[in-house]
Amino acid sequence: MKRITITFVTLCILFLGKNSHANQKNSFENNKQQTIKVALLLDTSNSMDGLINQAKAQLWEIVNELSYAKCHGETPNLKIALYEYGNDGLPSKNGFIRQVTSFTSDLDDISERLFALKTNGGSEYCGEVIFTSIKELEWGKNKNDLKLIFIAGNEPFTQGKIHFKDAISDAKEKDIVINTIFCGDYNQGISGSWQEGAYYGGGDYMTINHNKNIVHIVTPYDNDIIILNKKLNKTYLFYGSIGRAKYEKQALQDSNAEALDEVVAVKRAVTKSSKLYKNSSWDLVDASDKKDFSFKKLKKEQLPDHLKNKSSEEIKNYVQKKKNERDAIQQKIQELNKKRNAYVAKKQRENSKKNELESVIINSIKKQAKKKNYSW
């Protein structure tokens, strides 16, 4: 009898221990930093130049809004993927679909890819591009991640060999929300099944005037932010085999933003002052925050000229100096941006801003994020 009791107690301890381990594992999964994953599926047929221009101009404002998101008191990660579809220049065997980039936090890369998109008119297969993005992208299994698809176009949603309902059933299995953006008249989009696509996908149906000229609101704080951005750029120190190319890409995307409008350059500068703009793969200041980073392992020939002859300790001290400078500059930009946002909000109340890609995406993300305990 005694032996049986001991065995029973032992089993209880093992059972409780196992459950405790399982609870710790579940707790770890739940506390793992959340990620907002957004896949943009853009129609690049002949009539979509306006859509692409809006995406290029408003990328930074969308990112800036997402930078204010919180989940369990922390800023979530952001990853964006980009697809183009409906372009006759793409292989017909792939359904005239191309993955422009998989999920990435490299915002400069997203900007570069958007500026490289060209329209060329063709067949728009919405169901197939949704199916392809679900199949190809790494959506992950973290239940607290916010997983969103935004598909934009102007042809019937029902075209192609894969019906949108079949594609959307795969999305639901992975907890992915499908949002549809029809470029044109609201009722025309409904008749073309874009509203039905959003309904089955658990998302929002939206319309935009893709040919509308974007009116950017100029504020008294813009010039100061642009000046601070130039100072911010001087805190970046490239390293590694891709460092110089990435450093040059950063400057090019500054120029691309400024070429669209000075206010777009301001919005990009605000993004660069946020936690979502990370460049640890090529920038020494960001890389120095990583636990496994070692200054001793740097290849001197892959550094800027003024660092090549310095010792590891001297480089480390110099990087810390630049980090302090960057933190101060980013804080100033954020402070100016608070004033800028208040100014813009007042102007927007006076002149209601509707039917632009930026506003419909931001409103949709905020609404759907609440279901995952995200807040602003």
Image (cartoon, grey):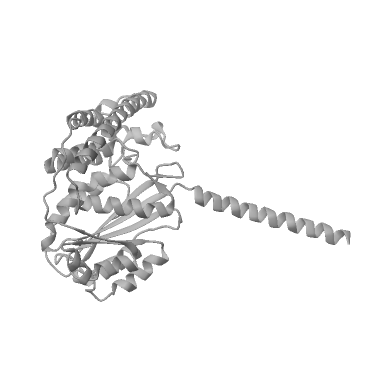
Q: Quadrant of the N terminus?
A: bottom right
Task: Name the quadrant containing residue 189.
Answer: bottom left
| Coordinates of residue 179 in the picture (x, y in percent) | 29, 61
Residue that appears at 34% across and 60% down: 137
| Coordinates of residue 313 in the picture (x, y in percent) | 39, 24
Name the residue at the front extreme.
350
Direction from residue 191 to residue 178 in the image, left or right: right
352 versus 193 height, above or below: above
Residue that appears at 19% across and 39% down: 347
Task: Name the quadrant containing residue 66.
Answer: top left
Direction from residue 34 to residue 323 in the image, left or right: left
| Coordinates of residue 298 in the picture (x, y in percent) | 36, 34
33 versus 262 height, above or below: below
Direction from residue 31 to residue 181 in the image, left or right: left
| Coordinates of residue 351 in the picture (x, y in percent) | 17, 44
Residue 237 appearing in the image: no
89 versus 146 height, above or below: below
Residue that appears at 33% across and 73% down: 166
